[in-house]
Every structure is written in C-alpha cells, then in structure tokens.
Image (cartoon, rainbow, N blue to C red):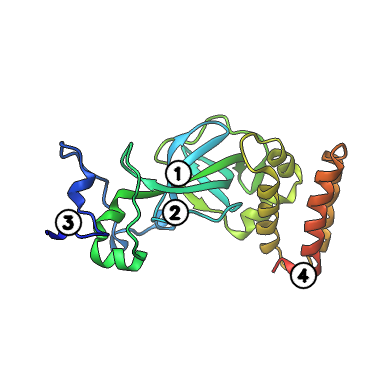
C-alpha cells in the first residue's frame, strides 16, 4: 500500500483532473509583502453597486461578522460591513473531504491540501468617504475587481456610525441576516467609542424606535438586547 492509499490521507494528485492546470496562485510571502497594501484583509473578486465578494488574504482570515471595511477603488473609498464568510475549495465542482485528523496533523502530513482552499467574505456597501465625511448613499461606480479591502480604523468607524442612517441601510438590505448584522455592527461601533456609550445607545435606540414603530415585537427584541449592553455586558 502506498502512502497515498493510507486511510485518512489523500494525495495531491487525487484532486487533479487529467489536465495539469495550476491549482491555485501562491500567497505572497510576508517578507515580500510590505507598504500600505500589507494592511489589506482581502481582494475584490466579484463586485456590484450594492455588494461585493472579496477573497481573504489568508485562509480563515475573513474580518469578523459585522466588521466595517473600506475598499480603495479608482480613487474612491467605499465603506461596507461584512455580512457573510465562507471557506471552500478553490477548484470548481470539488468539495473538501473529511480526513479524521486535526488541522495541525494535516498541516504536518499534507500541507498541500490547504493550497486548494480559500476563504471569501461578502460585504454590504453602505456608502463612501469624501475626505473625512461619510456619504450614506451608493457610490457612483462599484468597486473594481482586484481592489484591496482594508479594515476601517477607529476614527473611520466613528464617522460611519455617527449618523443613524446606517441603521436604515442595514434594515432595508435584502438577503442578509438583518437583525443579527445590525446588532453586530452596533457592537463594533461601541468598541470604537471611548467613555460612556449610554448616550450613543440612546440615539441609536431612538432611531430604531422610529424606523420600526410598526413592528413592535422586532423592535422590542432589538432594544432588549441593546439594553443588556448598556449594563456593561457588551465588553
């Protein structure tokens, strides 16, 4: 029995079709990746006016759910929130298989299989930055393919979330887990505000009460969870 036939293992060749097309592009070594682009967390691989998909710079390296990101594209600074992430095979029509081993064991024994995987994350576009101001409307053009995605810094998060308009953008977004995303983005917004957050939560709660005044059960659920944060349980 050869090494590739041992139970619980699989050779690299078994992933290949009869042709010899490349499996994936090699990541840029850390010592060769420098400058402003080194701070990127992903690269746009699919784009529309309202949403985009980015491939994470590292496997399992997607930003957190609800995290704010910015996309540098053709002189624009687009801003959005991460609403989904997934890790899958980079080869069409192929799915990873179970090996019955830990990731650490697989990395020691068959590190090549991780070159066949990629992590992608989806971003809901909220608007764009003009100087230091946030514009809460869709940008004139979608992000270009291969644009880099960066995490928003604390100051940018505060600018984006100062106007409660971003709550309406989240509540009206189709195809996303709206309530959980809204709560996650608020948690990220709170983390970037020093001192008491009670006033900020009050403003956001008032806006939610206005927007969801005809949906009492939903509003009540959101406010109840936000009130729990106000007692210090968000940290």
Which is more foreground, mark 1 or mark 2?
A: 1
Where residue 82 sits: x, y (%)? 56, 48
Ranked by sequence position, the earlier of labels 3 and 1 is 3
The answer to whether residue 208 is seen in the rendering is no
In space, the residues marked 3 and 4 are separated at their CA atoms by 54 Å
Counting residues from the start of the chain, the first of labels 4 and 1 encountered is 1
- Inter-mark Cα distance, 1 to 2: 11 Å
Return the x and y of residue 188 as percentages of the image width and height.
65, 58
Q: Nearer the viewer, residue 163 or 10?
A: 10
Marks 2/4: CA–CA distance: 32 Å
Q: Which mark lies nearer to you, 2 or 3?
A: 3
- Determine whether label 3 and label 1 are within 8 Å by CB: no
Secondary structure at numbered mark 4: helix
Q: Which residue is mark 4?
A: 232
Identify the mark at residue 54; answer none if there is no mark: 1
In the image, residue 186 above or below residue 219: below
- What is the number of the mark on residue 171? none
Which badge, 1 or 2, comes first in the chain's sequence? 2
For label 2, the residue is 40
Q: Secondary structure beneath disc 1?
A: strand
Residue at figure coordinates x 17%, y 48% from the top left: 13
Labels 2 and 3 touching (C-beta < 8 A): no
Q: Is the C terminus in the top left, top right, bottom left or bottom right quadrant?
A: bottom right
SS of the residue under disc 2: loop
Cα separation, mark 4 vs mark 1, equals 34 Å
x, y percent for residue 59: 39, 55
Which residue is under mark 3?
4
Instruction: Of the two numbered discs 2 and 3 on the same chain, state the one appearing first in sequence.
Output: 3
């Amino acid at each position: 029995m050869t090494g590739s036939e041992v139970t619980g293992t699989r050779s690299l060749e078994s992933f290949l079709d009869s042709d010899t097309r490349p499996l994936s592009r090699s990541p840029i070594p850390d010592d060769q990746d420098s400058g402003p682009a080194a701070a990127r967390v992903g690269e746009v691989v699919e784009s529309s006016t309202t949403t985009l998909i980015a491939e994470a710079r590292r496997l399992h390296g997607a930003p957190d759910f609800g995290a704010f990101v910015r996309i540098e594209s053709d002189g624009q600074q687009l801003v959005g929130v991460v609403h989904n992430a997934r890790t899958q095979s980079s080869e069409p029509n192929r799915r990873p298989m179970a090996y019955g081993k830990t990731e650490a064991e697989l990395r020691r024994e068959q590190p090549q299989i991780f070159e066949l995987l990629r992590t992608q994350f989806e971003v809901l576009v909220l608007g764009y930055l003009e100087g230091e101001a946030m514009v809460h409307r869709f940008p004139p053009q979608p992000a270009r393919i291969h644009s880099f995605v960066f995490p928003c810094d604390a100051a940018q998060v505060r600018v984006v979330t100062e106007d409660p308009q971003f709550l309406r953008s989240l509540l009206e977004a189709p195809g996303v887990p709206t309530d959980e995303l809204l709560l996650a983005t608020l948690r990220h917004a709170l983390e970037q505000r020093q001192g008491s957050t009670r006033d900020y939560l009050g403003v956001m709660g008032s806006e939610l009460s206005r927007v969801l005044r005809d949906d009492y059960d939903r509003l009540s659920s959101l406010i109840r969870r936000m009130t729990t944060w106000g007692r210090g349980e968000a940290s």
